[in-house]
Image (tube, helix red, strand yellow):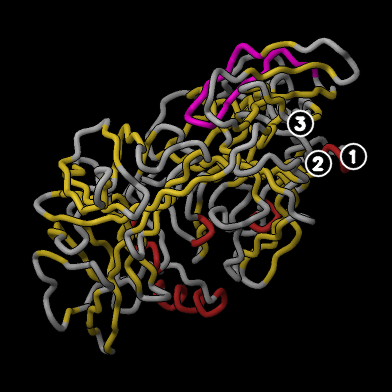
Amino acid sequence: MKRLIHIFALAIWLLPACVENDLDYPLVPGGFISIEVEGQKGVEISNKTRVVTIDLEETALPDSLPLLSYKLTDSTFLDTPLPEVLDLASPMKVKMHTWQNWEWTIRATQSIERSVNCESQVGEARFNESNNTILLRVTDDQRLDRVCFNSMKLGPEGSRVISTTGYENDGQTSRQVTRDCVFPMTLDCILTRSFTVVYKGRSEVWNLEAVKVLVETEIRGVAPWCHSADIEAIFNGKGSPEVQWRRAGEEQWTVCDSVTVDGTDIHAKILNLEELTEYQVRVIADGKESAVETFRTDHEIQLYNMGFDDWYLGGKIWYPYPADAHDSLKVWDSANKATANFLGSITTPVEDFVAVEGEGKKAAKLESTYAVVKFAAGNLFTGQFVSLKGLGADLAWGIPFDSKPKALHGYYCYQPKPIDYYDADHAYLKGKNDIGQIQVILTDWPQQFHVLSAEEVFVDVKNDPNIIAYVNFETSDYDEGYVEFTLPLEYRSYRTPKYIVVVAASSRYGDFYTGGKGSALYLDEFSFIYE
């Protein structure tokens, strides 16, 4: 009877979640549950595309990766065993079978930080990894036959640039010369010059071209905050540049004390500014004065109910605002409307476990749960629950917001359970501690973003061009009490935002019906930090 009930429920919901049955047999096609190689930073396993993507440390050799372990779904067999050492310099095809044949692809991604540092350099060197070329820009008064290189990193951490080859003129003739690299060193870069880098007995050659560019003294960018402003400028590299600022309409200029110079780049920070005020800034270097740039400082905004003290119970549903709240106060919402009938409210207030004691103080409790065949994570977000849509929910993320905080501050307590429910793409997480998550997103979307869980429509935080700033916090640690946190936002642009999303979940992969039943994330006393 138990099995019949499960099958009947599955037919109703048509969910991709793993269903427990009498045989404890995951209903998934043949594929990988986990895989690990030496030098691995992370791995992504997609049962939809049947692709395993392994992210490598920069010190790993993609064509020589010792295989540490792997696990396949139940009743799955490889046509040919995996070798002890994988060559992922190019994607690797793997064939396996259950009662059907399946083909998977294993591929590797790797990022290597490369740099060139020389005198009179303009900006960072540009690397083209497809043909191993480097474009180096220097000021227009720099002699190309006498470029002084201070340092160079062309390969993984631990690699060495051992030699360079290029044409040099001795006053009579031009001939090709190979020299050992000992930095700092001055080299002739009129023509293309090659550099040889070695790492773990392997060598690679990079070709560098140096070009002159005309550099004017100018301000490249101003990032105004509430009480400060970050200034980016450029000059020709001669002398000591001076950054000056004043309130718009005043005559007297003030010299900025916080200035750093890196080659031709100038970085300055102006402090002790007033909110919502216009200021002007300029740069003076080598007797030349930049154009005056005008900017306006930001203002501090805090959201309503960031302390999570105000709630009301409407039937079975808890709402994170008062019963008589005007729409402007309905800042926070949850998916309680979707879960109340069969799971109850999974985001609720608590009074006996708060970060800051006081009359009327409460905290938010987000708890993951499971009923029949549906797993749900406790969640809280700025925006509105719109409706049930298909087999999931339509959540409108974001509320109007036009300020730029530096960080989110607050308190959390996470008490995870082992992951015991999962879909096919996250089967590799079974038995591991659940993951709690807090995110902040600043955007200039034209309207709210509608998260459609059943259709797997989610914010693409890596590639969405409308995202101005972002921070993501995840934890699997078990906490007995509250932990104070500060999450600095990473800004991708200095545009003025239109919306802010603050979202938290008791199970990081709850949208994919993956998590541990009973995982609880407590939140209290949120606030934005401004600078």
Q: Residue at x 42, y 39 (%)?
A: 143
Rounded to the nearest whole Å, what is the CA distance between mark 2 and mark 1? 7 Å
| Tag of residue 291 | 3
| Type of the residue with mark 2 | Lys
Quadrant showing the C terminus: top right
**What amino acid type is highlighted by mark number 3?**
Ala
Region in magenta: 256-274
Q: Nearer the viewer, residue 71 or 365?
A: 71
Q: Position of residue 113 (x, y in %)?
A: 35, 45
Q: Earlier in the sequence, mark 3 or mark 1?
A: 3
Q: Label 2: which residue?
A: 330
Q: Secondary structure at mark 3?
A: loop
**Number of marks in the image?**
3
Q: Which mark is residue 167?
A: none
In the image, is 435 to the left or to the right of 89? right
Q: In the rendering, at what x and y percent does residue 191 appear?
A: 35, 54
133 relative position to 227: left or right: left
Q: Please identify the quadrant where the N terminus is shown.
A: bottom left
Badge 1 marks a residue whose secondary structure is loop
Disc on res. 326: 1
Dot 2: element: loop
Residue 39 visible in the shown view:
no
Residue drawn where x is 39% and y is 69% of the image: 46
Q: Determine contact: label 2, label 1, CB under 8 Å.
A: yes
Three-letter amino acid code of the residue under disc 1: His
Quadrant for residue 92, please give it: bottom left
Of labels 3 and 1, the one closer to you:
3
Q: How far separated are the C-alphas under marks 3 and 1?
A: 47 Å
Residue 107 vertical placement versus 284 (above, below): below
Camera-side residue: 221 or 333? 221
Q: Is residue 47 left or right of residue 509?
A: left
Mark 3 or mark 2, earlier in chain: 3
